[in-house]
Amino acid sequence: MKDIFDRENEISLLKNSLDSPLIVIMGLRRTGKTSLVRSVLNEEKATYIFLDMRRFENKEYIVYKDFIQVLEKEINRIIKKNRDLISHLQIRGVQIMGISVNFSWGRDKVELSDIFSSLNDWGEEKGKTVHIVIDEAQELIKLKGYNVLYSIAYAFDNLKKLNFIITGSEVRVKDKFLKLQDEESPLFGRVSIEINIKPFDKETAIRFLEEGFREQGINFDGKERVYDILGGNPGWLTYFGYVYIKIKDEEKAIVNTKKYAKNSFLESFVIS
């Protein structure tokens, strides 16, 4: 899998878990969680709905309308290649408009559990699992007036053709969002497959930089120093390489990367 560097164990575990109801992928920002999920699902030619919650990072709170519009856009993307899905979406709160659907979020709002049931029915008809990815799911802690965990718990217990892949930082996604160990959580007691994406160790980080620069025809001798300063986060190492290739100044590239990493870290904790 060319898009992922040195993640063979994580790739294998994810591939072997795609029929389980709930997979939780945890790791720091920019360690490659999203790339891992997309690469595996694309390689497996899986049908998946990708809900990117990063768009809500700078919002103080979100409402059901915000979430359901993201889901609507993704389902319409699926419909373009699978028009027979429309017939399964003839449910309360869904307006069929030719080859697309419109989800109501007002008084007659569509219920998330009904959408999940429709996707499951379609999956059963097609003989395949539908994967629902919620990327950086801890952003849904900000969702006011609606708890998506009840619908996920219902799907976990009853909808065998749905698989949920939840990504996020370990503490926030496990303890503040899913709350699998909290007796008051709708998902309490459910068993999930957990995959931890860790930063590269020194040897792997150096190989990562070495191969990246080699592809660009550049002989770079500062790999060990870069690791000692920036660590093994593949996102920061990639950003460093991008900046260095543009300006050819190691020190400035390190400074720029540290600023970028700091800003990204602060943005992720604007709302705790």
Image (spheres, grey):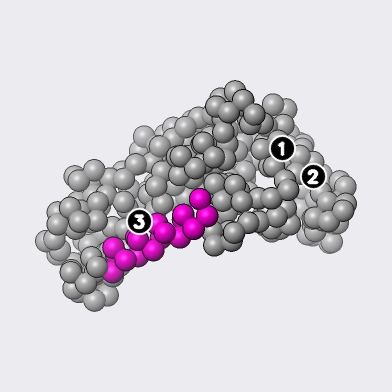
Establish if 113 lies above or below 136. above
Label 2, label 1: how many angstroms apart (C-alpha)? 9 Å
- Which contiguous range is marked in magenta? 256-272
Label 3, residues with CA under 10 Å away: few <14, some 14-19, many ≥20 = some
Establish if 267 lies above or below 249. above
197 or 270, nearer to the observer: 270
Q: Are marks 2 and 1 in contact (CB under 8 Å)?
A: yes
On the question of residue 160 being in view, the answer is no
Residue at left offset 18%, top offset 73%: 249
Mark 2 highlights which residue?
111
User: Splitting the image into 4 quarters, where does residue 255 fall?
Assistant: bottom left
Label 1, residues with CA under 10 Å away: few <14, some 14-19, many ≥20 = some
Mark 1 highlights which residue?
151
Label 2, label 3: how many angstroms apart (C-alpha)? 37 Å
Amino acid type at image mark 2: Glu
- Assess whether residue 2 is covered by the magenta stretch: no
Amino acid type at image mark 1: Ser
* SS at circle 2: loop
Q: Are marks 3 and 1 in contact (CB under 8 Å)?
A: no
Mark 3 highlights which residue?
235
Along the horizontal axis of the image, is 142 left or right of 4?
right
* SS at circle 3: helix
Along the horizontal axis of the image, is 176 left or right of 207?
right
